[in-house]
Structures are given as C-alpha cells and as structure tokens.
Amino acid sequence: MRSESKPRLPSFGSLLAAFIIAWLVFATFSHALRLIDQQLANSQVYKLIIKGETLLLDGSSLDALNQELRHFSTADQAFLAESMNAWADEQLDALFALSEEGVENYLDWYYSLPGSYLRLFYALKGNLPEQLEKQFHQVVFVNSGFELALEQLGKNYTQAFQTRLMAQQEEQLKTLQTSLHEKFINRQANVDESAAIFTLNLDQAFMPEITLPATDKVRWQQSAGLSVAVGAGMLALPAARAMTSRIMQTTAVRSATRITLAYVARLTPRLAAAMAASGTATAAAAPTGPGALVAGIATFTIFITTDWALLKAEELLYREDKALGLKESLGAWKLELAKELEEKTRPLFAARQDYLKERLNQPYVEAGVEQRFYLFPEKPLED
C-alpha cells in the first residue's frame, strides 16, 4: 500500500508576500478614497459670513481659513502673554519708582545733621536698629505713597488685568476679522449661493454680542468676565512693613549701623573733652559776663563743624554703595511681586484662551457639521 501524502503548508515567504500584497492593496484603496473624499470636499461650496458680507469658498479655501484661525489661537496667546507681561511690568515700574525716590529722601535724612544726631541719640539709647527701621519705613514706603499704591494694586489688579486682557483680545479679533475678509474676498468660488452646503457665521465669533441669542449672550459675558469662575478679590501681596524688616537686615544697612555704633564709641571721649574745654573757658571768663556764652558757643561750633565734616566724608564714602544696596533689595522684591502676580493671573489667562477657542469654534457648531469637522473638535459648544 502507498502511504497518503500530507498537504503542504504555505511557506513563511509566501505568507509574507501575501500580507505585503494585501497591505499595498488596502493602502492604495485607502489613499484613493482619501483623494476622492478630498476632491469632493474641495468641490463643495461653503458660505462664509464675515464683516457683514457673504463669501463663497471651496474646500481648499476653507482649509486655508481653518489654518488661519488655528494659527491665530496660538499666536494670540503668545501676543497676549507678551502684552500683559509688559503691562504688569509698567504697573510695578510705576509702583517702585515711588520707593526709589523714597530711598534718596531717606539717605538725605540719614546724612543730614539732624539725622546724624538722632542716630547718635538712638545708638546711645541702644535702640538704633529699631529706630532706623521705623524711619526707613516711614520715609521710603509711607511718605512716598508706596504703601497706599501697593494696597490699591492688590485691590484692583485682578479686575484691571481682566479688563485689559479682554480689550486686547477683542482688538486682536477685530484685526483678524479685517485680515481674513481682505484675504478671502478674492478667493471666492464662482458658483450660485444655493450650492453652499452649510454656513459659517464668523461675525458671530468676532462680534458675539451682536448675533447671539439672549441666553447665549449671558453665558458668553460670564465666560468673558470670568469673575464667577475665578474671582476678582484682593490679592494678598506682601506688606511693606514685612519687607522693611527684611531690607533692614541687608548688608548695606547693617554695615551703616556698625559705622554709627563705632562712631559713638569714639564720640564719647571727644564729647567729654569738649564739655571740659567749654567748662574751663567758662570758668576763665566773668561768671556773669558775656565771655562764658561766647566761649561755650565757640566750643560748640568747633564740635559741630568737626562732626559735619566727618558726616560729609562718610556720605562721600558710603552713600552710593548704600543707595545701590537698598535699591537692589527693592529690585529683588519687585521680581517677587512680578512672579506672584503672574501666578495669580494665570487662571484668568487660561480661562480667556479657552473662551477664545469656544468662540472661534462656535460657527462650526452652529452650522450643524459633525464634531470631527469642528475647528477645535476638543472644544464643542458647552450648554
């Protein structure tokens, strides 16, 4: 008997070749379908309402329009971030200009004779650092108007930021509206208007207060205002009093305090000698005559003149470095405030950008197209 032969299994090479052929057929077929779909889409007509005019666009022009709008949503964010950062810097520059002027006023007092003798008096009493801190706070932050301006900044910043952000974005949208109108008015399809398969009312996105129904208008205004979601209360900014204590611990201030204390140590024997000299001169003169007064005035004048010369020499040596150190401390605080303001307003900025995407997306939603055709499919219109 002959044995039965077993059926031969296809080789690995044959299976691989069959798979490749099937994949190529599928890819070719899919590509052909995409081309057909694209040609059909390009041949379709879309009605675009912009600046009160109706423009008829084919599919390729609509694709170009969509690219413009998506690019704008990204470029607008970069522009607004740069613009708002510049505005925030202006607010802080105006605020800290007050304190920098206050530093100069404080140093004028510090290197004046009244200021010098007050420092000596406080040093002799043992409370020089506390009194210098009190004087610095009063002159630099209170008298200059800085403290009041800082309080007003905390109260008003969020609302002012919000208002300016909205105005900047509205201006950008108006510019975009004009630009798109000028660009696509010359790219219209030469067909009958009835051929349009759906209508995109871009004016509704650029000027929603004109075209939206009353119920939607309220929602858009709430989204634009953001006060419901984010809040527009007072920012808890660092107080000037707390910053005074920190600044008075800096090297520039502590070194000046050491100079004053060292001067007091040298002053005590000089002061005793001056008083002794004054007493000797007074005793030498007639007890009730004018000689005692003249001698006392002469001794005191020499004492004051000497101290004045020493004070001016100290100012010449140390004032510039002291002013630089104080202003550097204020500059560090300014950077801290800038960072804090940025963190506090980040939710406002993010919410406004989300609102922009919803706004630009709305005409596609209102046109009744499938969600996959939305400008931003991830941002359907919220109820």
Image (cartoon, rainbow, N blue to C red):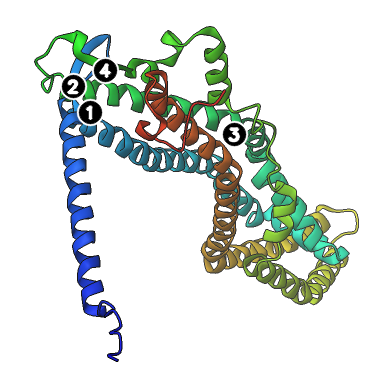
Expressed as whole percent of the image width and height from the top left, the position of residue 90 reads 47, 39
Q: Amino acid under label 1?
A: Leu
- Name the residue that disc number 2 marks: 57
Residue closest to the far bottom: 1
Q: How many C-alpha atoms fall within 10 Å of the one at disc 2: few (<14), some, or many (≥20)?
A: many
Foreground residue among 159 and 17: 17
For the residues marked 1 and 2, what is the alpha-carbon distance in whole angstroms? 6 Å
Question: Which element is circle 2 on?
Answer: strand
Front tag of 1 and 3: 1
Judged from the image, the secondary structure of the residue bearing numbered disc 1 is helix
Determine the secondary structure under disc 3.
helix
Check contact, mark 1 vs mark 3: CB within 8 A.
no
Within-10-Å neighbours for mark 1: few <14, some 14–19, many 20+: many
The correct choice, above or below, for 108 with respect to 194 in the image is: below
Tag 1 near tag 2, CB within 8 Å = yes
Question: What residue is pinned by disc 1?
Answer: 62
Q: Name the residue under label 4.
A: 197
Q: Tell me the amino acid under the disc marked 2.
A: Leu
Using the numbered discs, state the Cα–Cα distance from disc 1 to disc 4 in whole angstroms.
12 Å
